[in-house]
Image (cartoon, rainbow, N blue to C red):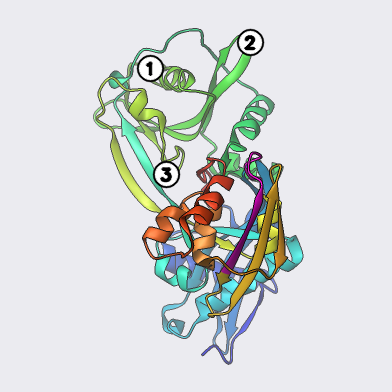
Amino acid sequence: MTVGFEFRSAADDQEFAAYLSRAREAFGKDPYEPGTLRGHGLASVAVGRAGVVGGGLAFPFEQYFGGRAVPSGGLAWLTVAPEARGVGLGGRITEFELGWLRDECGAVVASAWTPAVGMYRAWGWEAATVASSYGLNPRELARPTGGHTVTQPTAEECSALRDTLAAEANGPVNRPGWWIDWKRRVTPDACTLGVVRGGDLVGYASFTHDQVQPWGFDIVVHDFWYDGLDTAPALIEALAGRSPQVRQIRFRRSVLPRSAPLQWSLLQYAVEEQGWYPWMLRILDVKGALEARGWAASMQGRVDVEVVEPSGTARPYRLSFADGHLRVEPGGAGHVRLPATTLAAWYAGGLPLRRARALGMATGSPDEVGRLDSLLGGFEAWLPETF
């Protein structure tokens, strides 16, 4: 029971500092530039008789789904003091933050990175995809096909290319200006290079150097964008060619999607892959979320679904779709029935309903389940930003 606790935005710098102290105890480090995240979002706290016993950070942004930017937000650094755990404070803090994102910022979905998938699932979230980091020996690269030259791109050129490519996946953040500046400050030693084809920037990477004993260094890639399979090897070769002292190229977690280009780009596949934890998604407004994202323009028709909330309440919706848009109305026969958690994973492109049906995570006829899957349009679930 959470009786006796108040959930609110940090009232002043003293309460914010108390939350940061709790976060440091839980994570062993401070959030990355927490003042920036607070300034562009919400620093929530749970306050009891002993003072601040927990809190978290929430910040609004847009995420691409189906080629359209959808109002969203991120939750991070959820913290509850050890002596206050086990009474539901984490869930209440999260609901307070989600309410702020929904009511004050207009968010219809929300994202978080967490290993606590069971706890978040009980709150209505579901895993969209699992992130991985990759390491490769540059001497295992295939030679690029040619036609690319290395360049030092401007920030504006990088943003334009990233915005174009980000819309081709489900999940990338439509990075606001403050986000870009924040990431630059938290990785002040980052370098950027790009590759050009036909006078146009077609790929870029941002990276840092990690010294290796007794000599040499690894290149650690923080951002990696490319327009096709011929560009990816050219960009990797540009990174490896910076110095004969490059020992390994390491792609940080989630920099590459699950369908990473490495298996199609290497002469010998000896890639080191390390799994991280999942990107989880929560649907805050079923109607708003379904109507905001893009859908396959070739699909036309109607399907009735029933969405079961974590509380057990079942809500029927009639989905009508045509020309890449979807309209949601209450009611219908509920021919396809699924939990809100399954809806979130499907929405992100991480769990086809055919597979969910086979796993017992959804019910419905193969025809109607297949039509809903076809609506997704083949966009891959991928959140390249970590927070």
Q: Is residue 32 above or below residue 298?
A: below
Q: Residues within 10 Å of mark 1 (few under 14, many from 20)?
A: few
Numbered mark located on residue 199 in the image: 2
Determine the CA span between mark 3 and mark 2: 31 Å
Nearer-N-terminus badge (3/2):
2
Q: Name the one closer to the observer, 250 or 346.
A: 346
Viewer can see residue 60: no
Q: Is residue 111 above or below residue 258?
A: below
The location of residue 5, given as percent across then percent down, is: 59, 87
Q: Disc 2 marks which amino acid?
A: Gly
Q: Which residues are magenta?
A: 294-306
Numbered mark located on residue 253 in the image: 3
Q: Name the one closer to the observer, 75 or 186.
A: 75
Q: Residue at x 36, y 25 (%)?
A: 264
Number of marks: 3
Please give left or right for residue 349 compared with residue 248 in the image. Answer: right
Q: Secondary structure at mark 1?
A: loop
Q: Residue at x 57, y 90 (%)?
A: 49
